[in-house]
Amino acid sequence: MSAAPPLASAIPAAAWSRRRPQRSRETGAAAIARHDITSTRLYVDADLHAGAGVPLAREQANYLIAVLRLGEGDGLLVFNGRDGEWRADIADASRKAARLVVRGLTRPQPPTPDLHLLFAPLKHARLDYMVQKAVEMGAGAIRPVITRRTQVARVNLERMRANVVEACEQCGVLSVPRVDEPLALDRVLAGWEAEEPGRRLVFCDEDDHRNGPLAALSGLAPGPLAVLIGPEGGFDEDERKRLRAMAAVTAIPLGPRVLRADTAAVAALAVVQAAIGDWR
């Protein structure tokens, strides 16, 4: 599967208008906690190192200056998904342009989680929720797949990437998950063994009537993982048979209740992380 193009440094205005992190007026090399949850955090595309100057896009400048009412000398945290998290100060400020000066490293860059979320695309509001929660739950790749019963034909990748960045900013995530182009599920499964060697695919099967998923997951060893969530109408019977016949697939139920697809994604990621992921 091909990787998504790099994230844009400017985030759509719709994403900026939803965020209201708390202000921080710390400057210089002020000591902070390992996970600073009070400071404003901002994704930038520039390389980060001590003394670097980072020009901001107009949308970002407007967000900091007009929305958060920050000004020259105010501090914030910045990250780019590559170089860790850094303390930076606002050096120049106007509503149309701003520049940051990077001061010091606050957290080193962690490895990207080796957990992928594969899912049938949903309508906008519920897709926004699913993508944001997948980032919070530790997904390292967001991979839309088109199943035979998928009801949404077009996927707004720019919007999905904006939601990924927003979730990273709000929740202290430093490894920005990639967002892939949508592919047909049949194409993904046909190339799974060659393109995803060693990656276990956890298939959330709505027709699996066992009591819970833990028994099925308990025998799996930690390693590269992927979770597959189907569309609102469920998987086609031929898709289910094909998945269950694959050696790399582990089918699990998600309990006795019917879950909407966005809820199922959060539930499945939580169960997988707790059983064989980084919650152990």
Image (tube, helix red, strand yellow):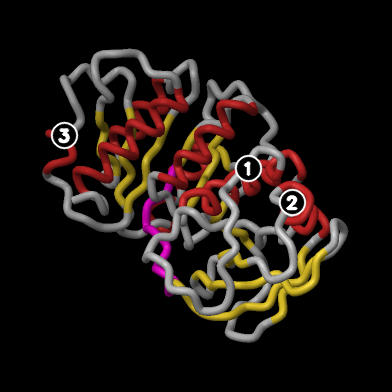
Determine whether, in the image, residue 187 is placed left or right of residue 264. Answer: right
Which mark is nearer the camera, 1 or 3? 1
Name the residue carrying label 3.
Answer: 214
Residue 229, given in percent of the width and then of the height, sits at 42, 32
Residue 11 appears left or right of 121 = right
Point out the tag, 3 or 2, that comes first from the N-terminus: 2
Tell whether label 1 touches label 2 (CB within 8 Å): yes
Q: Position of residue 220 (x, y in %)?
A: 17, 48
For badge 1, the amino acid type reads Arg
Q: Residues within 10 Å of mark 1 (few under 14, many from 20)?
A: some
Q: Amino acid at mark 3?
A: Leu
Q: Would you place residue 193 above or below residue 233 in this image?
A: below
Distance of mark 2 from mark 1, alpha carbons? 9 Å
Q: Which residue is mark 1?
A: 19
Q: Report the amino acid beneath label 2.
A: Tyr
Contact, mark 3 vs mark 2 (Cβ under 8 Å): no
Of 93 and 117, nearer the camera is 93
Q: Secondary structure at mark 3?
A: helix
Mark 2, other Cα within 10 Å: few <14 / some 14–19 / many ≥20: many
54 magenta-colored: no
* Res 203 seen here: yes
N-terminal label among 1 and 3: 1
Whether residue 114 appears in magenta in the rendering, the answer is yes
- Element type at mark 2: helix
Segment colored magenta? 107-117
Asked if residue 3 can be seen in this view, the reply is: no
- Residue in front for this viewpoint, 167 or 88: 88
Residue drawn at x 13%, y 42% as measured from the top left: 218
Mark 3, mark 2: which one is toward the viewer? 2
| Residue to which mark 2 is pinned | 63
